Image: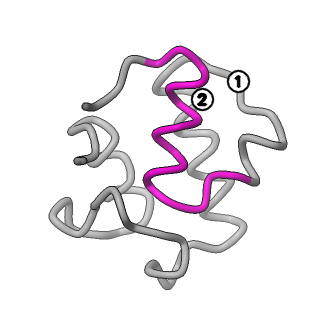
Amino acid sequence: MTVDKRLTSLLAEIFNLRESDITFELTKDDVGNWDSLKQMDLVVTLEREYNITLGIPDIVSMVSAEAIVKVLRDKGVSIGN
């Protein structure tokens, strides 16, 4: 499975990675600067970009690209494959 182009671009920008580095298997442990501040940057960006509200359980669960896609889909966002 691949990550949606729009989400890939957002994740690359947030975590200062190349878009080619963003895979479905990417996890928090793979990204050196994915700390609590970057997590909040991620949350704010996703909420703004997709016009959604993320709760604490959503925020805590977003520890990989796969988990982010799942949360977005659970919020009704049509994303990726």
Give neighbour class at mark 1: few <14, some 14-19, many 20+ (Cα, 10 Å): few
**Tag 2, which secondary structure?**
helix
**Range covered by the magenta-colored residues:** 61-77
Q: Give the main secondary structure, helix, strand or loop, of the magenta stretch.
A: helix
Nearest to N terminus: mark 2 or mark 1: 2
Q: Position of residue 44 (x, y in %)?
A: 62, 39
Residue at 44% from the left image edge and 57% from the top image edge: 14
Measured as percent of width and height from the top left, residue 50 is found at: 49, 22
Q: Which mark is residue 47?
A: 2
Q: Which mark is residue 53?
A: 1
Label number found at residue 24: none
Which corner quadrant of the image does residue 71 belong to? top right
Scheme of image coloration = one colour
Q: Quadrant of the C terminus?
A: top left
**Residue occupying the far right of the picture:** 56
Label 2 to label 1: alpha-carbon separation: 6 Å
